[in-house]
Image (cartoon, rainbow, N blue to C red):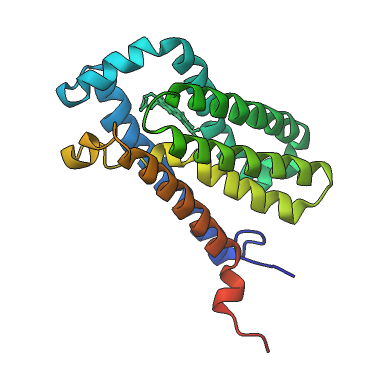
Amino acid sequence: MPTPTLLAPSSAGSRFKTILWVALGLTVLFVFITSELLLITDYPMYHAYRLQVIADRHLLIPHTLSGVLALLIGPLQFSSRFRQRHLKIHRVLGRIYVVSVFIGSYTGIALAAGRPGLPGTSMQAAAWMVCTAAAFVTARNRQIVAHRQWMARSYAVTFTFVSSRVLNLWPRYWSHLGDSFAAVGVIAFTLASLLIVELGINWHELTTRRA
Ligand code: HEM
């Protein structure tokens, strides 16, 4: 029976959760400034990509809106206090999260179509949809422990949008993003994110010897 820190937080567990969310929030801020703001303000290294983004705007607008919704709703859904006080809102936001992930995946694949990144994006989108669908189904089945675990996996994939952009300002990293390295990179980020969540879910079993 799993009782990991992710699921039943002790005081050390909730301190860890706070530190984790603050670190993730700071990473989002860093990526927002170094990737998105610089892209908007036409940073020279991003210029060619900026033109591509403008050409893709019909897909990128729904993609970005749904992605931002998933990114922002996720943390609220993990708050036990919020869930206990506002279960109805938790359910409504959960449905919006699921729809956002599916729109984000579909538009993500459409954006990558015909480009070297397609295999990686397709795998990332598949992982995103499978984890999110499993989170939804387990919630419907009132399998709450499994539901939280699948939501953690789903949000880990949501967060690859951020983690895969942390190194964007490094020219050697950026220069590879348009080639097939991008596909391998996206798969690596997705796999690493899911593995980190698995380690978190199994932390208790990994660090405690049975009496
Ligand atoms: C938090 C969730 C997400 C948000 C907020 C988001 C938002 C964005 C934005 C703003 C862009 C254009 C600017 C940029 O590249 O920085 C973009 C591009 C793109 N996104 Fe997402 N996204 C998210 C998740 C995903 C996921 C999970 C996938 C995979 C299914 C994906 C696939 C793509 C693709 C293929 C592009 C175009 C990249 C290219 O043309 O090289 N996104 N996204």
In the displayed structure image, the side of residue 23 where residue 70 appears, left or right: right
In the displayed structure image, the side of residue 39 where residue 95 appears, left or right: right
- Quarter of the displayed picture in which ligand 1 can be seen: top left
Q: Residue at x 49, y 58 (%)?
A: 196
Q: Where on the picture, by quarter, is residue 7?
A: bottom right
Q: Where on the picture, by quarter, is residue 55?
A: top left
Q: Which image quadrant: the N terminus?
A: bottom right
Relative depth, front residue between 23 and 110? 110
* Residue 45 shows in this picture: yes
Q: Residue 150's spot in the image, x, y percent? A: 65, 49
Q: Residue 94's spot in the image, x, y percent? A: 69, 34
Q: Residue at x 84, y 46 (%)?
A: 141
Q: Where on the picture, by quarter, is residue 14?
A: bottom right
Count of all numbered marks drawn on residues in the image: 0
Q: Residue at x 36, y 32 (%)?
A: 116
In the displayed structure image, the side of residue 144 where residue 99 appears, left or right: left
Q: Residue 110's spot in the image, x, y percent? A: 50, 22
Compared to 178, does 64 lie above or below? above
Q: Residue at x 23, y 17 (%)?
A: 41
In the displayed structure image, the side of residue 82 where residue 27 appears, left or right: left
Q: Residue 42's spot in the image, x, y percent? A: 21, 17
Q: Which image quadrant: the C terminus?
A: bottom right
The outermost residue toward the bottom is 211
Relative depth, front residue between 188 and 80? 188
* Residue 26 shows in this picture: no
Compared to 24, does 29 lie above or below? above
